[in-house]
Amino acid sequence: MAKKKSKQTPPPSEDPIVAGAGGSSTGPAAGNPPPTPSGPKKQSSSAKASPIEPPSASLIICRNKHWRYISAFHGPWLQMPMEILETIANINYNAARPRPVDAASLFDLVKIRRLVDEATNLAVRAASDIASPILTNVHGGFGDTASMGLGGSGHGAKLSRERKFRMREQASQKLARAYRLDEIVCSVATMQGASPLENVAQSVLQRNPKDLDAKYVHLFHEKIPSRQLAESTSVQPLTDIIVERPTEPEVLRTRATVKVFKEDLEGAAQDLTHALSLCRFHPPSHAASQEEVQLQEPLRARRRPQDVILAEKDRPSSLEGQLVFQRGSVYLTMACQLVGQSLPLHQRHESPTGDGTVTQNAEDEDANGAKQETARKQLESRKSVKILAKRALRDYMAFISQFEYSPYLPIGHVKEFNDRINMVAVQGIRNPRPSDAMAAAEPHKVYSLADLFAPLPPSDLPPYPSQNVVRNGSQPFVPETSCEWTTYHPLLSDALHSLLLCHCLVQTSPKELQRHAYMVARLVRLSDGYPVFQASRSPSRSDWVEVLRRADNWLNLSASWETLCAPAPIPIYDAPADQTSTPNPGLAASAAKALINGESPESVAEDMRKERIREQAIMEALDDERVVDEETFRASILAREKRAEEDYYSHGAAVAGSRSSAANGSHPNSGSPSSKAPQRLPPAESPMKRWGGAGDGDSREYPILTERASAIAIWVRDGPVVTGTAKRKKRTKKSGTSSASKTTAAAAAAAAAAASIEAGMSKLDVEEEEEPAET
């Protein structure tokens, strides 16, 4: 039976991008074992999806492969042995601040990997009648007995049906705990598991339809037609779980994600607000079970006393960060959707009569009244855009405030961290001793990332951008005693670029927004997920680059965004003192190739430029959420290559070459962009002509510009200044109350905040001075 089910499972390489939101819930309710429309109770998952759309017309995959941001969490951690991964997490926690990787996210990742590996082991054993866990590995493979065709349990007896059910039930419980920790990380981890893992929750529900953990897991593992998550998913199973367990914020987070796919953004914001109130007043328990505690005791005894090894219950949680990030994304999406209703771009015409003449009779009064009503609604929409953008800005600032930055971190701390990681990964040393010399190192300043975006940022930051960054895209490799350093999180790049998009909608002054843009570029070029995560681009970064293009770079940035965000050079520990620069890798490669093949350096450089453009187009197409198959993938690449060639010949080789090659660390060999030469597009014939797609002709083939980037670019260029959106927050005297009354009052305030979202978001939580109303 296991072999039969594995044929229905898509290959692990299938990883469709996020499905577009929209549509109503017409498919079967996720999480219910029997399909509601019709059919027998033990109908397979592929058969359940057939009434929605035939399998021949659409790929049938698990629902969790549609989850947003799964591409940001890929990396070596998926293949690392558990002991090495946990040792790296402890080394990271004991590293000098700012820690290289966010400790809360990394601890949750370790926990999720262990739970998914254990669940995979149980599911494979139950599917193949293996009683002993020794005969399976952590990745769900089979032991030597299975590969030799012996099968069975290894002791000559098959497992009973009750034993198999208990094993699948235990696996389902472990997966539910993993999904509650972080549904995105767990979705990535389960994609590496064996095929029996996908059906374990469904098997439990066939016998016990009221199992809440199996319902929760089945929501992620149910097979649905690709790109049809909104039509094929119901929120009712999640609502049932919330009714039974009202103090679990994780299920509210999942329901909010489903509501985003269904375009119920107000409902998603309400769920996330409620989840935040539960998270703050009923923190989730991360305590390990008694079995896990017994397994960890010998490991703690072997640890060296220099490192702080946190118990499971004392490890930080990343749940609150997930909630504020997702709520900020919801608010930003709501603000962008209102841009089209707030600007009178599509209403600058009069309605002609049937014979082609314009009415000029008594109906003019009604027309004037309608115009005034329309203008009033547009004014209210503009205010709502700014209010929602401020709320998104507040949430993104709360998210990045969890991470740290140091302008002058001693190089020795970086060297010690890398050396300890190498001792673990290469030499196999499980408990590398920290350096005694670094314990007595001079202290260094550490700032929260939110401090860098304050009205008065720290005054001791290194200058940025420097002339080396503007001209060459990187700094010279000069041995230094200190370096800039920041904490890494897979969603940090998306949050930072979303911060800039929010400032566009808030209508921050160009000078202030330029300062924020340079600060974002400074942090993005320092962001590095070594040794756990791999680098990934973000949708918000792509949208921000498009806004700069469409809005004619109104910030007058000194170089292209790819050049400003080029990765910073790795700190050099033992380089010669006279080493002040490194040769341009692009020049060296083109010269070597020309010498070997007997070609002209100019032709070789042109071929390399086109190759870099194609590589960049492929990277951007892979990050595009609208790419769903091979046809759209090829169309996206072709459209981006056409646009890059148009930019190259329109604005000169220097600007276009730096934009297409900076991401790969190589740069054009002639004509670097001037420090005061912004990228400027030729003026369009109509302000609405270039918003729709990639340019003049290729927009009909494949639209590069997303709806969000288009809305923000229109707002930047055509949106009038909006005032009168800020209100003073009433201050009340603090009175001495008991802790119980404080908790009750805070819970009531959280409930009132959730109600205000549903009522139309009439209040603003950001404290500012009142402004005069817009005229």
Image (spheres, helix red, strand yellow):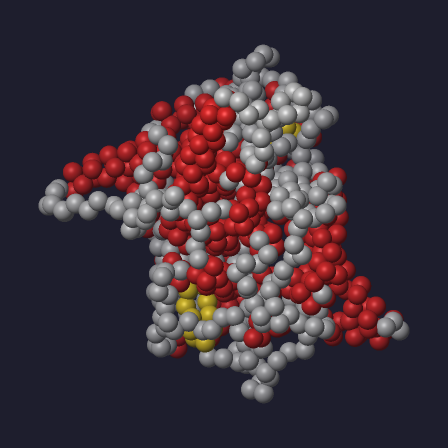
* Apparent side of residue 564 relative to residue 513 in the rendered image (left or right): right
Residue in front for this viewpoint, 405 or 389: 389
* Residue 570 visible (yes or no): yes
The residue nearer to you, when weighing 732 against 340, is 340
Which residue is depicted at the point 74% across and 56% down?
A: 646
Quadrant location of the C terminus? top left
Give percent across and percent down for residue 340: 53, 38
Q: Nearer the viewer, residue 534 or 450?
A: 450
Q: Is residue 572 above or below residue 492?
A: below
Asked which quadrant contains residue 346, the reply is: top right
**Residue 358 sits in quarter:** top right
In the displayed orientation, state which residue is furthest to the right: 598
Residue 76 coordinates in the image, percent (x, y): 57, 54
Q: Residue at x 49, y 21 (%)?
A: 362
- Residue 670 to residue 743: above or below: below
Q: Residue at x 64, y 18 (%)?
A: 51
